[in-house]
Image (tube, rainbow, N blue to C red):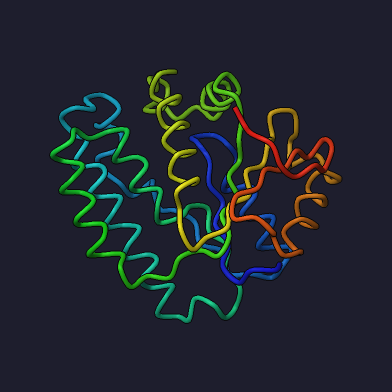
Amino acid sequence: MHSNYLAVEGLIGAGKTTLARRLAERWGARLVLEEFDDNPFLPRFYEEPERYGFSVELSFLAQRYHQLKRVSEQDLFAPRTIADYSIGKSLVFAMATLGPEENALFRDLYQIMYADLARPQVIVYLHLSIEQLRERIRQRGRSYEQTISTGYLERLRDLYFDHLQKLEGTQVLLVDVQQIDLLDDQAAFERLCDTLEAPLVDRVSTLDLRSTAIGGQLR
């Protein structure tokens, strides 16, 4: 792995945790997985998003901070670290969930809490169609996720793309996995690893695993 700290990102059901586990196993890296099951506000948020939006985002902000702070204190850059989320995830979801005033307050808290935490050197973003994401959400069967709307997923996708394009100090690899299963397709997984084991030239790149081409736009 060319970078010492890599985060896997993507929408709900994109396969972040599965890929993070495989990469950590391949490179003998420390694995950091988001502890979302411990968030008591999440099921309530999906039932009443306007009422519990700020509570769920603030709770996630605190959980992610405490987890990454512990990792930082263990010397984040030795050994290598693979995470199934990046700290900027909190900003993306807050933009999708909160109103302008709550979002402004949230961003202030984020900047105060996260100012001294290390950022990933590389973010791998897994891109799937909204239809594929909805099918994966249905298949994994978490009851509180079944009410997630197409509109919410589309807004998250657009906010993620905007966030990643504007991100400073981190290289981004957007990986199109719409016709690829990185769990079962070993050749595609090897092509992704080969890409990550070499220095990324551009700050934002796209990778089509069907052709190994780098460049272009995702939609």
**Residue 46 vertical placement versus 84 (above, below):** above
Rendering coords of residue 48 (x, y %): 21, 25
Front residue of 218/149: it is 218
Rendering coords of residue 46 (x, y %): 30, 27
Q: Quadrant of the C terminus?
A: top right
Rendering coords of residue 57 (x, y %): 26, 44
Residue drawn at point x = 23 percent, y = 27 percent: 49
Q: Is residue 73 left or right of residue 200?
A: left
Residue drawn at point x = 35 percent, y = 58 percent: 64
Q: Quadrant of residue 104?
A: top left
The tally of labels here is 0
Front residue of 217/104: it is 217
**Residue 24 vertical placement versus 215 (above, below):** below
Q: Quadrant of the N terminus?
A: bottom right
Residue drawn at point x = 48 percent, y = 52 percent: 85
Rendering coords of residue 190 (x, y %): 82, 52
Q: Is residue 163 left or right of residue 30?
A: left
